[in-house]
């Protein structure tokens, strides 16, 4: 190939990161995670009911924005802090949102985690449907936001 035909290709990480998040809506990719629990094969995600941390941490780990994939919000938060994410007051597009613990009746109280995508919208795993969905970032003021994280690598 001669020099005239060479093209300089520079990955746009933030744009790709945001596209992966937005394109994840409706996917069942993060629905199941199997482990042996007391010697018994168990879907610890309960067919998508508890998949929010698995969903978020898998995307973050793919882009090397955290160290590994997690199955709990608490372990994801710990990795966010270790990996340079900082708590901020206002969300930016691509921020990580942590919502307060809430009881849905069929599981213990659990925090929730997702991505802020702008225009008062977020994408997170829907425990009702078992896959990621787009929704109002405060669930129309039905769920309090505990923390918002931002990583300067996304600037």
Image (cartoon, grey):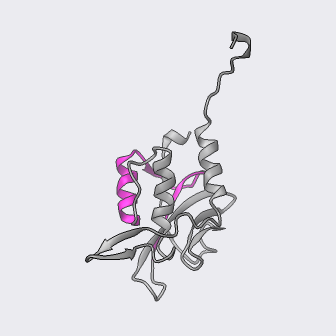
* Residue 25 vertical placement versus 67 (above, below): below
Instruction: Report the residue at 58% width, 67% height from top.
Output: 28
Residues rendered magenta in the picture:
72-101
Instruction: Report the residue at 65% width, 22% height from top.
Output: 8
State left or right for residue 19 relative to residue 115: right
Residue 31 covered by magenta stretch: no
* Residue 110 vertical placement versus 1 (above, below): below
Tell me residue 31's x, y (percent).
Answer: 52, 69
**Is residue 150 among what the camera can see?**
no
State left or right for residue 19 relative to residue 80: right
Towards the viewer: 41 or 86: 41
Tell me residue 1's x, y (percent).
Answer: 68, 14
State left or right for residue 66 relative to residue 94: left
* Residue 118 vertical placement versus 44 (above, below): above
The residue lying furthest to the bottom in this view is 105
Tell me residue 60's x, y (percent).
Answer: 48, 51
Instruction: Report the residue at 54% width, 76% height from top.
Output: 127
The residue lying furthest to the top in this view is 3
Instruction: Report the residue at 56% width, 39% height from top.
Output: 155
Residue 80 covered by magenta stretch: yes
Tell me residue 35's x, y (percent).
Answer: 35, 69
């Amino acid at each position: 190939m001669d020099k005239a035909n060479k093209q300089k290709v520079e990955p746009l990480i933030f744009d790709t990161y945001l596209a992966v998040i937005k394109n994840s809506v409706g996917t069942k990719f993060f629905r199941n995670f199997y482990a042996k629990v007391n010697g018994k094969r168990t879907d610890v995600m309960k067919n998508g009911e508890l998949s929010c941390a698995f969903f978020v941490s898998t995307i973050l780990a793919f882009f090397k924005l955290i160290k590994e994939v997690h199955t709990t919000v608490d372990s994801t938060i710990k990795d966010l802090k270790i990996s340079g994410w900082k708590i901020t007051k206002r969300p930016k597009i691509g921020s990580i949102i942590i919502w307060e613990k809430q009881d849905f009746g069929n599981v213990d109280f659990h925090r929730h985690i997702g991505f802020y995508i702008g225009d008062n919208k977020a994408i997170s795993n829907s425990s009702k449907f078992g896959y990621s969905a787009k929704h109002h970032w405060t669930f129309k003021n039905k769920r309090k936001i505990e923390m918002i994280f931002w990583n300067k690598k996304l600037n």
